[in-house]
Image (cartoon, grey):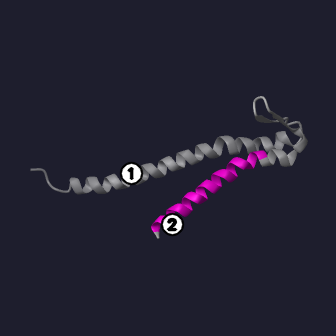
Amino acid sequence: SGRSLVIKEAHNIAAAIWIYSLTLPVLFLAIDKDDVSFDYRRYACDYGFSAPFWRPVVLPICSLAIGIIPITLVAVSTMMLLLKIRKREKLEVSYQWSQPFS
């Protein structure tokens, strides 16, 4: 049914968000697990980035994942929403103005 499709899509979107949010921390741990410190005062995890692998490879990946992908997703979803609204309004407005003025 239509409702179960919407629920499945919502679950897929939630799973994608979880996977996306876990990608960088797992990448940081995989590259240099000894360079991670946890501070109980601030309750924060800090990465030292001292491995030579960070600059040429991981930094561009991080900037892509943190900066470019979210902005692109917001822009694309906004354009899709605006096109959908425009299509809906065009259908309503075309019927409204199809009658000649009197």
The residue depicted at 53 percent of the width and 61 percent of the height is: 7
Image x and y of residue 89, in percent: 32, 52
Q: Which mark is residue 4?
A: 2
Mark 1 vs mark 2, CA separation in Å: 25 Å
Position of 83 with respect to 70 (left or right) is: left
Position of 52 with respect to 12 (left or right) is: right
Would you place residue 25 above or below residue 41 in this image? below
The residue depicted at 60 percent of the width and 59 percent of the height is: 12
* Most foreground residue, 92 or 35: 35
The residue depicted at 32 percent of the width and 54 percent of the height is: 90
How many marks are shown on the rendered structure? 2
Check the image and name the residue furthest to the left: 102
Residue bearing mark 1? 85
Determine crowd level at label 1: few under 14, some 14-19, many 20+ residues with C-alpha closer than 10 A. few
The residue depicted at 46 percent of the width and 67 percent of the height is: 2
Check the image and name the residue furthest to the front: 40
Position of 9 with respect to 60 (left or right) is: left
Image x and y of residue 41, in percent: 78, 29
* Residue 7 falls inside the magenta stretch: yes
Would you place residue 96 above or below residue 50 in this image? below
* Most foreground residue, 69 or 97: 69
Residues in magenta?
A: 2-25
Amino acid type, callout 2: Ser
Amino acid type, callout 1: Ile
Position of 34 with respect to 42 (left or right) is: right
Which badge, 1 or 2, comes first in the chain's sequence? Answer: 2
